[in-house]
Amino acid sequence: MLLAQYKQTRQYTESLCAPLNVEDYIPQAVDFTSPPKWHLAHTSWFFEEMILTKFVAGYAVLDGHFTFLFNSYYQSVGEKAVRAQRGLITRPTVEQVYQYRHYVDEHMVRLLSTDVSDEIKALVTLGINHEQQHQELLLTDLKYTLSLNPIYPVYRPDFNLVSQCSNAVETPEQWLSIDEGVYEIGHADESFCFDNERGRHKVYLQHFEIAACLVTNGEYIEFIESGGYTTFNYWLDDGWTWIENKQITCPLYWKCVQGQWYYFTLAGLKPIDKQASVSHVSYYEANAFANWKKMRLATEFEWEVASSQFTWGQRWEWTSSAYLAYPGFKVSDGAVGEYNGKFMVNQMVLRGASVASAEQHSRSTYRNFFQPHFQWQYSGIRLVK
Amino acid sequence: MLLAQYKQTRQYTESLCAPLNVEDYIPQAVDFTSPPKWHLAHTSWFFEEMILTKFVAGYAVLDGHFTFLFNSYYQSVGEKAVRAQRGLITRPTVEQVYQYRHYVDEHMVRLLSTDVSDEIKALVTLGINHEQQHQELLLTDLKYTLSLNPIYPVYRPDFNLVSQCSNAVETPEQWLSIDEGVYEIGHADESFCFDNERGRHKVYLQHFEIAACLVTNGEYIEFIESGGYTTFNYWLDDGWTWIENKQITCPLYWKCVQGQWYYFTLAGLKPIDKQASVSHVSYYEANAFANWKKMRLATEFEWEVASSQFTWGQRWEWTSSAYLAYPGFKVSDGAVGEYNGKFMVNQMVLRGASVASAEQHSRSTYRNFFQPHFQWQYSGIRLVK
Amino acid sequence: MLLAQYKQTRQYTESLCAPLNVEDYIPQAVDFTSPPKWHLAHTSWFFEEMILTKFVAGYAVLDGHFTFLFNSYYQSVGEKAVRAQRGLITRPTVEQVYQYRHYVDEHMVRLLSTDVSDEIKALVTLGINHEQQHQELLLTDLKYTLSLNPIYPVYRPDFNLVSQCSNAVETPEQWLSIDEGVYEIGHADESFCFDNERGRHKVYLQHFEIAACLVTNGEYIEFIESGGYTTFNYWLDDGWTWIENKQITCPLYWKCVQGQWYYFTLAGLKPIDKQASVSHVSYYEANAFANWKKMRLATEFEWEVASSQFTWGQRWEWTSSAYLAYPGFKVSDGAVGEYNGKFMVNQMVLRGASVASAEQHSRSTYRNFFQPHFQWQYSGIRLVK
Amino acid sequence: MLLAQYKQTRQYTESLCAPLNVEDYIPQAVDFTSPPKWHLAHTSWFFEEMILTKFVAGYAVLDGHFTFLFNSYYQSVGEKAVRAQRGLITRPTVEQVYQYRHYVDEHMVRLLSTDVSDEIKALVTLGINHEQQHQELLLTDLKYTLSLNPIYPVYRPDFNLVSQCSNAVETPEQWLSIDEGVYEIGHADESFCFDNERGRHKVYLQHFEIAACLVTNGEYIEFIESGGYTTFNYWLDDGWTWIENKQITCPLYWKCVQGQWYYFTLAGLKPIDKQASVSHVSYYEANAFANWKKMRLATEFEWEVASSQFTWGQRWEWTSSAYLAYPGFKVSDGAVGEYNGKFMVNQMVLRGASVASAEQHSRSTYRNFFQPHFQWQYSGIRLVK
């Protein structure tokens, strides 16, 4: 079953690249994104470096250069420079990177066809989850790059990532009520989760009411039109500095052309669908919107407790929780331990999943996190009152 | 009694300035500090603007320019420029600023000698607490400025702000144990507190042990000498970037001269006292130190619950809690409402008080907060395991 | 003959791209370079925009988007952003850009097969010279991009751009003496030149002696090894700031590996040839080297007067002349007038030509110019005493 | 006579400070300006360091710290930080700096009352000229600082630095004609000059006509009102970037209040005098104004040759010459040699003198120089056609 999962994941990554030209694989638009070619190679490097070279006797790496070029675990300044220059690495070619993938796949499939140890199983599962994270980034990074081309290229004309609150049970006005009390938080069973979800523990929650549906584009346009971006009082101080310095006046990818709102999507430039959930907002914007509504965002604990009662999974949802360690958090040993703990400052937690997430990559205890100014994920807003 | 408090506070601010020359009142070393002259004037402006002009019929401001010059509630970019230029405002002179203080005092004393409303009482109390905050900043800002003078000027030769863990009951090795359970957090009674302390609520804490004493300079030197600042693994990613970019290798004000550690103090440059509590560390440093010790910092809730069992008050203590709203947090209306809520992102909470705090300005529910890279407060480290 | 020149120039540009993979056409390493794809398209745009759309009745542009995407004459901030994002324009594809070139060529060849006006002839000649400038940049920009790939890709294994002072008549120690007197400077006849070369005029030169040969890599290594980059006195103040801030310790593309000097070339990483002329030095470095030698660089007037007596053409040679207008300089009308005049501040003149220059693109009155910190051209050093 | 000159110069510096409060002596508004206190101390340091400690047996410096604090000849990065922090050096006090001046004066007067060597005479003369340069900077730096105080402080109510073209012989429309030919440039006799003026040499000038008067504020307002700051074509590329980035729309110190132009002067905020010569323009502005007029600025050689035929001395006049070495320029040995040569890149020459120049500090061969964006000197515009 792990073999099937492995194959499915690797294949899905390649299927995401099917609509690309060779040219599309190359650019890195900004230091926090990576080129498709790099995502393809880095996820392969993970299996090669963490599993094949360690557990397969006589395994020969395909190309020693790749070990350096496609490693993301950089620590010193010189190597950070390399990180910002992923878009300049024209060689190896795209074709050579596919050869690399297939070489790694061949050896992984051979390995997984044998009876492997629990340690290897755990690492393969981690590698699959790691690749699923990169699938998400591959799409959001690609969208960011394409959006900067003034001719608004189309990734796939039939690509429709828009979500609507059309669930028969839920209506935009509906509020779910959660009682005060002690609740358990964190990953409970033996299935896979990241280290930051572990350490199941009790929290005490006050009573709260949470919206059944996400904020829509239509509601967000109201916020804009009522002066949301020019009213100091709605904004965190850092948020106000951010919108002033960057001259932010709407979510990422939105354009107002002759009074009509459009957004760039992976299907090209489209008129905004007012019924769809807003996305590509920063935490600052989500928080300002909630202030304007005289409401607030949920904490990540409130979200986790309430999540069984509403539909989620198309937008990452900003919470009002800073990304911090759970009680008893322990960093794993070795390179895999660099994963999460070192980012536990200056970031806010997002809960749920997004339209860019692989289907298997979603659970109610999952903690995503970004700095509060980032907009390039499919991030949305759910209100609490 | 409010009148006495008012007089005492106002007088104490001036006594802090007694050792200064006119020249010392002027400079602003960096945008997050302010000149002594500005602290003197701004705290007076607060009483004038928030109370005298609103509640005293016929009150005439001493100088209309001061309303603009000494207001800190700036919102637009142009005015932020003004904020960074407080050190360039040579006129009014220091003497004129003292005249301003005394003019405001005269009217405030007259007002407080009458039977004033609860609204006024609340505002005066706020003004007193506001001035106490500025007393703290006046000292820490002054220390920052003087430290940049290569001849290390002395503020007061007898100024000794060093704290030691000399409490008879406590020893450096002592650990206090707190049981798992539900605890109440936040300001409980009707006495003064800031808006961010209100909303007393329950939290669930896991069992923990907290150090009776703060980390000492001696222990911190061990951290440095064992490679603390050159070992990537101890640091948060942002913290590592910070020490690399700013070339940080020790707490603020420390210098190593021929293998001996010294620090700049308000009594001049001194050899470091190894028994004294470390201070002037950033959150990044406090967190890295705790990682090196294989321990951690307390959350602000743990700190508040445990604080009755140890001595505190000379060092602000970094907690592992991000500065966020308590359940039910409400921003006050008007200018006083700008106080705290808008800073609730990208900051970490400090608990306790410091040697620069006015005696009356200290309570176990008090939440101080700064961005994680700031070192210029008397910030220290208390460990939890 | 103009038709032949046109064809030869267009063909030569494409031949320079023959060794490239599709991937190599895409990246823009830094804002002052451009991708090969952009050079190919922009030079075509020039002929389309300046000639075909203006002089060919019924000419239809191949794609209206290209008019915007491949225009370099940006003036406002928004468009400057576009300039820095040439590497993100993955569509049109490389193949489409070649189709664009051939479409333009087809119409240009048809036009040039007729009897065209002098105005058109002049514009075609300008377009040819413009494309020759881009041929030079195509190579130097490509070299810059490839150099940032840690695996040092090879453009062409047989590409040898190294020049040596091997002329039978000249020896490294030879000095040419020029008499004091009045000389004529500037383009003299009716052949093509840029506007900045026009306005032939008299200058008075003092007696000087100029080196027959350029400074070699061997001499430059002596400069480095004698502390050239750590001795304040050799450097202009701005140059010293530049080497300190950017941590410059050698010419661009040089690396010292275990005491041996190597440089990246378009044929890959190679040991440095000590007899070859140094290149990829900034004006600051050229000036510092001359100071170390207790000599100086030539003015552009000295260079022009002396140039008939020595061999030149493989290295652009830094002069000590700032790039300023000749007496009577007039900016041409229209877009072509934006060419040169607006850059006449903060730049230094280079004379000669380089190994990256097209053969026909070289004359003794040619004035190249760059800011004094640029190193990415094949720039060299000729001394005067 | 040297003694009298010394005394006069030293006294004049102090007289410039007479209107200052202690507070005014402290701030440094920006890294290219210095506080009055520093100018007072540094000019004294020059005499102490270059003369007293070297030539007076047994001379004891007043305070060893001053040798470090008031030295401007910084070379390394650490010390550059110190340069930007002159405004933070509150100790020594202003009174102590005056004591330092008087201590140095006492010893200098004693020395100059004896029969001193030519070497000492030359150094004293250099020191006097150095102090005169600082007198100029003291005024222009002070003006810059005071201008940033929103209440527009007055330095001296009777301070009138405005110049008018009221010479009976000259009229605004008058043009002076200079013939083509060979002219001699540079300092001719044995009187004092800086190293950059030496090396008298021949230049060949083409015929030109130069304005008898400087451009007035009235003419400059016409330029502004006809769209001067929004028309790309008038500007050098770097100049356009500068006005866009810094949002420059008028000369430094100008404000438009309800359609009326005012400027900040050392006598306070005043309505602009349209007949007076414009000042506080950058080279970029001077050049753009000339382009708008379809004229140009003079080269420094044209200016020097023509200067005997017009009145000058109240505005530094931007020339179109980059600041470069004269033929045969030699840097002096030792610290005094750091004076001028190292700035010979990226700067433009100004000729003449300004209302802030000491009377004795003016001659037709004097070469002042600044980067093209600086506006804080009394810089003006003279046209050539």
Image (cartoon, coloured by chain):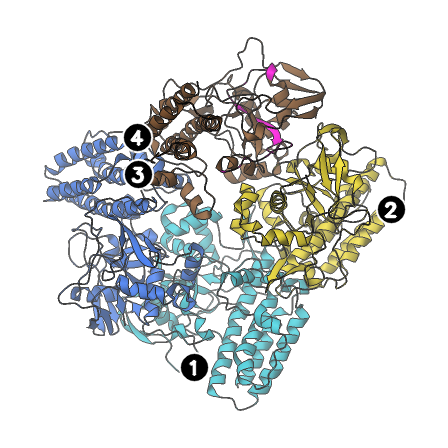
Chain colours: A brown, B yellow, C blue, D cyan
Magenta stretch: includes residue C293: no
Dot 1 and dot 2 within a common chain:
no
Q: Which mark is residue A99?
A: 4
Question: The numbered mark 2 sits on a residue in which chain?
Answer: B
Dot 4 and dot 2 within a common chain:
no
Label 4 element class: helix
Dot 1 and dot 4 within a common chain:
no
Residue stretch in magenta: A308-334
Q: Position of residue D308 (x, y in %)?
A: 38, 73
Magenta segment's dominant SS is: loop
**D160 lies left or right of C146:** right
The three-letter amino acid code for the residue at tag 2 is: Leu
Q: Disc 3 and disc 4: Cα gap in Å?
A: 13 Å
Task: Return the residue at label 1.
Answer: D191
Tell which residue pokes out farthest to the top in this image.
A168
Q: Which mark is residue A91?
A: 3
Q: Disc 1 and disc 4: Cα gap in Å?
A: 79 Å
The three-letter amino acid code for the residue at tag 4 is: Gln
Q: Nearer the viewer, mark 3 or mark 4?
A: 4
The three-letter amino acid code for the residue at tag 1 is: Ser
**C166 lies left or right of B31:** left
Q: Which mark is residue B3?
A: 2
Which of the two residues, A205 or A275, is positioned nearer the viewer here? A205
Q: Nearer the viewer, mark 2 or mark 3?
A: 3
**Number of other residues with Cα within 10 Å of mark 1, as a class: few under 14, some 14 to 19, many 20 or more:** few
